[in-house]
């Protein structure tokens, strides 16, 4: 897994690519834990370039969703990836992240970032 992390205002954008297997899911979770420990609670996952995600990777998203919600934040999911969207729909995680799912970065930017005036 390759991983890039950028910050746009109060949002941390995490963009993994390739496979998120069990080992890389643990690295992803550590990255999110670091972000949360810095007091940031608006985390964006751009999953457009992910070719595989294991249950540990999805678990890391859901586990951290509860943490950031308690802090008054949110986890946003960006995915134009048919595979990721299929996994989310099959596991009903599209309902868990309802209102925070975007089919492109541009949609996220226009619906969230522009409202935040970032």
Image (cartoon, rainbow, N blue to C red):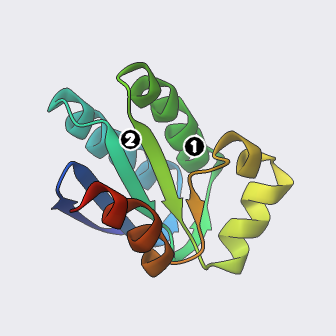
Lateral position of residue 69 relative to residue 102, left or right? left
Query: What residue appears at the point 69 percent right and 40 percent down from the top-left corner?
Result: 96
81, above or below 47, in the image? below
Q: Are marks 1 and 2 in contact (CB under 8 Å)?
A: yes
Quarter containing the C terminus? bottom left
Can you tell which quarter of the image residue 15 is in? bottom left
Quarter containing the N terminus? bottom left
Query: What residue appears at the point 35 percent right and 22 percent down from the top-left corner?
Result: 71
For the residue pair 29 and 92, the one nearer the viewer reads as 92
Q: Which residue is mark 1?
A: 56
Residue sticking out furthest to the top: 70
Disc on the earlier residue, 1 or 2: 2
Lateral position of residue 69 relative to residue 93, left or right? left
Q: Which circle marks residue 18 in the picture?
A: none
Can you tell which quarter of the image residue 85 is in? bottom right
Mark 1–mark 2 distance (CA, rounded to whole Å): 9 Å
Please tell me how many numbered marks the rendered image carries. Answer: 2
For the residue pair 31 and 85, the one nearer the viewer reads as 85
Within 10 Å of disc 1 (Cα), the crowding (few <14, some 14-19, many 20+) is: some
In percent of width and height, residue 50 lies at 52, 73
Q: Is residue 1 visible?
A: no
Q: Which residue is mark 2?
A: 29
Can you tell which quarter of the image residue 13 is in? bottom left
In percent of width and height, residue 45 lies at 43, 59
Query: What residue appears at the point 27 percent right and 45 percent down from the top-left corner?
Result: 31
Within 10 Å of disc 2 (Cα), the crowding (few <14, some 14-19, many 20+) is: some
Q: Secondary structure at mark 1?
A: helix
Q: Secondary structure at mark 2?
A: helix
In percent of width and height, residue 40 lies at 23, 37
């Amino acid at each position: 897994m390759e991983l890039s992390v950028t910050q746009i205002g109060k949002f941390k954008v995490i963009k993994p690519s390739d496979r998120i297997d069990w080992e890389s899911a643990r690295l992803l979770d550590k990255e999110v834990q670091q972000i949360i420990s810095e007091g940031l609670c608006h985390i964006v996952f751009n999953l457009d370039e992910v070719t595989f995600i294991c249950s540990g990777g999805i678990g890391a998203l859901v586990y951290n969703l509860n943490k950031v919600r308690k802090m008054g934040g949110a986890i946003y999911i960006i995915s134009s990836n048919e595979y990721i969207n299929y996994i989310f729909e099959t596991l009903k995680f599209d309902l868990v992240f309802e209102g925070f799912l975007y089919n492109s970065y541009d949609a996220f930017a226009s619906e969230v970032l522009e409202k935040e005036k970032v």
